[in-house]
């Protein structure tokens, strides 16, 4: 964790464990995961991947998505992020997977992966996306993919077999 001082009183923080920090004035700080959403869009056994235009992991692929804002539901965040990054919208979707990873040093994230085979609009890279590409599902397990997502390709393939 990069924070060393209490956000309430500026006293030095003491690390209790990897998650909990306290200050001498009795305030607590938890280094909990941030919530993020990703949308797995599928077409002809390919997945729509967004090439990152910004750090971290600039130039690598990820799913369209991003962090859930304060007061926002994961579904609302998924719709907002999809529109912001691709110009697309979806009406039918389901939750495919939940995974944790470290977004940056000391920034743990819990990703909710939504999946859909139906959308409205034409993919157009926007916001922090350099390009949008329909790539083989196995790209997710390659060095071209920004973060490891163990088992995600198997879950995507199983989802496709349900059709």
Image (cartoon, rainbow, N blue to C red):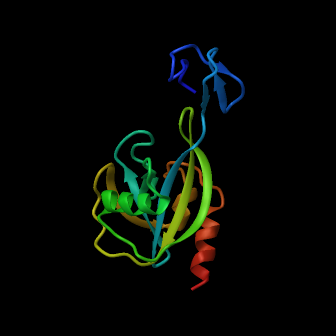
Q: Is residue 106 above or below residue 94?
A: above
The structure residue drawn at horizontal position 64% and vertical position 25%, both measured from the top left corner, is 21
Q: How many marks are shown on the rendered structure?
A: 0
- Please state the horizontal and vertical placement of residue 161, each as a whole percent of the image: 61, 82
Image vertical order of residue 32 relative to residue 47, above or below:
above
What residue is rendered at 72% in x and 28% in y? 17
Q: Residue furthest bottom?
A: 163
Looking at this rendering, what residue extends furthest in the right direction? 17
User: The C terminus lies in which quarter of the figure?
Assistant: bottom right
Where in the figure is residue 116, as x and y percent of width and height? Answer: 47, 74
Q: Does 154 sit left or right of 104 as displayed?
A: right
**Coordinates of residue 162 in the picture (x, y in percent):** 61, 83
Q: Quadrant of residue 91?
A: bottom left
Q: Residue at x 64, y 14 (%)?
A: 24
Q: Nearer the viewer, residue 45 or 33?
A: 33
Position of the N terminus, as image quadrant, is top right
Q: Position of residue 75 (x, y in %)?
A: 46, 63
């Amino acid at each position: 964790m990069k924070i060393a001082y209490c956000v309430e009183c500026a006293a030095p923080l003491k690390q209790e464990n990897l998650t909990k920090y306290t200050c001498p004035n009795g305030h607590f700080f938890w280094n909990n995961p941030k919530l993020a959403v990703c949308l797995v869009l599928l077409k002809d056994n390919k997945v729509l991947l967004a090439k990152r235009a910004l750090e971290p992991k600039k130039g690598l692929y990820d799913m369209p998505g991003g962090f859930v804002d304060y007061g926002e539901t994961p579904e609302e965040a998924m719709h907002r992020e999809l529109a912001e990054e691709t110009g697309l919208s979806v009406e039918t979707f389901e939750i495919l997977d939940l995974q944790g990873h470290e977004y940056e040093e000391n920034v743990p994230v819990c990703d909710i992966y939504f999946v859909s085979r139906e959308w409205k609009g034409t993919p157009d890279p926007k916001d922090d996306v350099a390009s949008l590409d329909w790539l083989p599902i196995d790209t997710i397990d390659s060095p071209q993919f920004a973060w490891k997502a163990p088992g995600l390709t198997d879950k995507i393939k199983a989802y496709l077999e349900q059709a």
